[in-house]
Amino acid sequence: MQEQAFRFGRARHLVGIAGLPSSAARETVGVIVLNAGLVHRIGPFRLHVEMTRRLNAQGYPTLRFDLSTIGDSAASGESQTRHQQICADVADAMKLLGEQAACQRFVLIGLCSGSQSAHMVACSDARVAGAVFLDGYAYRTLGYHLRYYVPRLLDVKRWLGVFSRRRRAQQGSGEPAFTVAPLPQAVVRADLAGMLERGLKLCLIYSGGISRYFNHARQFRECFGGLVRHPDVFTRFFKEADHTYILTGDRNRLLEQIERWLAQNFPVTAGASS
Amino acid sequence: MSARGEAELPFYFGPERALFGLFHAAGTPARKAVLLCPPLGQDQIRCHRLYRQLAQALVADGVAVLRFDYYGTGDSAGDSAEVDWERCIADAATAAAELRARSGIDQVFAFGARLGASIALASAAQARFAGVVAWDPVLDGRAYVEQLDALQLALRIDRARFMQPRKETDVAAQWLGFAISDSLRQQIAGLHFKRPAAPTLLLESLPPDRPRAWNGFVVDAATIRSLQPPTPWDDPRRLEVAILSHPLIQAVTQHVREVA
C-alpha cells in the first residue's frame, strides 16, 4: 500500500497524508490523527507515521494532517475562532477520507493539544464514533497531592535541597510560556458523559510525562468519577513513559495498546486488508 | 485560500514514489531553484517550520523550491531504522532531478542544516549543485556521534521527562527519539570533509563552547559567515523546541539573490 499526499479542505489550505488499504470496507472506521502541539503531521519523533502505517496494515484507512496554520497547512482566510477552525478542519478531513475510503464513521486520535482538538470535535460531530485521548484533560486531585507530597515530606534529602531549588525558581528561566487554559473539570466531565450517551467509545491513555498534574491510574476516577467505569471507556496509565514517547519501546507499547483497543471496539470488517 | 498555499504542492516522487516532496512554485517564471535538504532525526522536526519559512521567502524572490524527506524520514516511505547515509545522498540527487523537471531550471542550489548540510555537501557532485549553503554542517562525524551518544545516555536519567530513571536497554540503539541502525552510526562516524565539491557558503551559529571543525574544510575565509544568536542545536532542555532564525532566512535569500 502506498500513501497519498493531498491538498484539501474548504479553501484547499490543508495538507495531509492518507493511508488507504486497498480493500477497506465501507463499515470500517477511518482514523484521523491530529497535530500534537505545533509539531507537523508526522508527530513527535514520527509517532503519527508509525501509528497510521501500523493501522493501515490492520486494514484501517487513516489520515494524518496539519490543522490550519500548523505544519504545511495555510490559513483558510475565514474569520473564525480557533475552535471553529479546528471543527471545520476536521470536518474537511473526514470529508476527504470519506471520499477516498468510503468510510462514514471516524475515530480521532490526539496527543496533548491534539487530544483537546479531538475532544472539541467529538463533542459536536455525529460522524465521530470514538476518540483516543493521549495525555488529555486531567486535574490535580486530593489523591494526587497525597501521592506527591507525602513521600517528599518524609525525604530528608529533599528538605536539604529545597532552598537552592527555590532560589533557582525565583531566578526563572526567562523563557516565555505559551499554554492553553484547560476547560473546567465539571465541563469536561459533562462533555465525556455526553459523548458516552451518544454512543462514542473513548480511550484515555496518559503518561508519566504529565506527572506535574497526573501521577496514578486511580486519578482517572478521581478526575472523572464513575463514568470511567462505563463499558465504553478504556483507561491506561503508562507511568514509565514520557509525554511524547521518546523511547522506541514505549512508543511500541502505546501503539500496540491503540491497535488492541481499535480491534476490540471497531473491528475491521471482514475482507479488508492492506 | 491564498495563492501561496495553492502553489505549494505535496506529492510523492522517485523510485516507487517512496519520497515525499513539497514543491513551492515561484509566482513568476522562476529564475533560480533551490533544494532544501533537511537534517536528520529530531533536528528535522525542529527545523520544519524554518524550512517552510525559508521556502516562502525564496519563492517571494522568484526562486522555485523543493522540500523533501529522505527515505525513512518524515512522510517518506521506510522506517526510521532504515535511514542510510548513501540512500540519503541518492535521494538528494533524485530530489534535485525532480526540482529541475518541475521548475524547468537546470541550475539548482542546495541548502541544508546540520546533517542536511553534510548531505548537500556529500551529494554536490552527484546532484550537480551549482552551489551549497551549509548551516552548521556536521564535518567531523566521530565527534558528532559521541555527542549524540552522550545526549542519549543523559536522557535515561532526565527527571524532567521520566518519573523514574530508565534502564540502559530502554535507551539503546536510539538517538533522541529515533531508532538508529549500526550501519548509519558507522557511516556518520566515518564522515570527514575536506574540500567542498561546489561553491559553498558556510553559515555558522554554533554556541561558543562547541568545537568548530571548519579548519581545513573551507579554503577561503570569506565563504564563512557568522550568524547571531547561537543556535541551541544540542541543548537537551530544548529538544522539542522549534529552531527558528530570521537572520538565517535573510542570509540564505540574500546569498541566492547575489549568486550568478
Image (spheres, grey):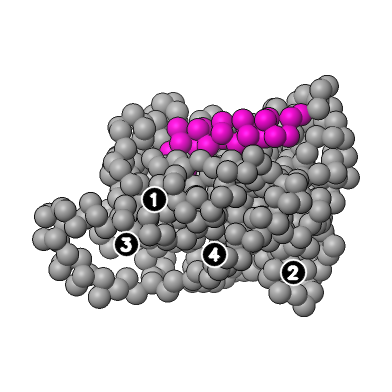
Disc 4 and disc 3 in contact, CB within 8 angstroms: no
3D distance between C-alphas at marks 4 and 2: 22 Å
What range is drawn magenta here? A242-268
Image coordinates of residue A207 in percent, x first then y, are 45, 46
Is residue B241 a member of the stretch shown in magenta? no
Q: Which residue is mark 2?
A: A84
Instruction: Work out whether mark 1 precedes mark 2 in sequence or the reverse, and give the earlier one.
Output: 2
Q: Amino acid at mark 4?
A: Gln
* Snapshot quadrant of residue B177: top left
Q: Nearer the viewer, residue B220 or B190?
A: B190
The local secondary structure at tag 4 comes to helix
Q: Let me know if residue B107 appears in the view.
A: no
- Give the alpha-carbon distance from disc 3 to disc 2, as whole Å: 42 Å
> Which chain letter matches label 2?
A
Q: In this picture, is A76 found above or below A269? A: below
Which residue is drawn at the image coordinates 17% and 64% (left, top)?
A: A162
How many badges with numbers are in the image? 4
Residue that numbered label 1 is attached to: A215
Q: Which mark is residue B207?
A: 3
Residue at x-position 34% and y-position 59%: A145
Mark 4 and mark 3, same subunit?
A: no
The structure residue drawn at horizontal position 54% and vertical position 55%, both measured from the top left corner, is: A224
Q: Which mark is residue A185?
A: 4
The chain containing the residue under callout 1 comes to A
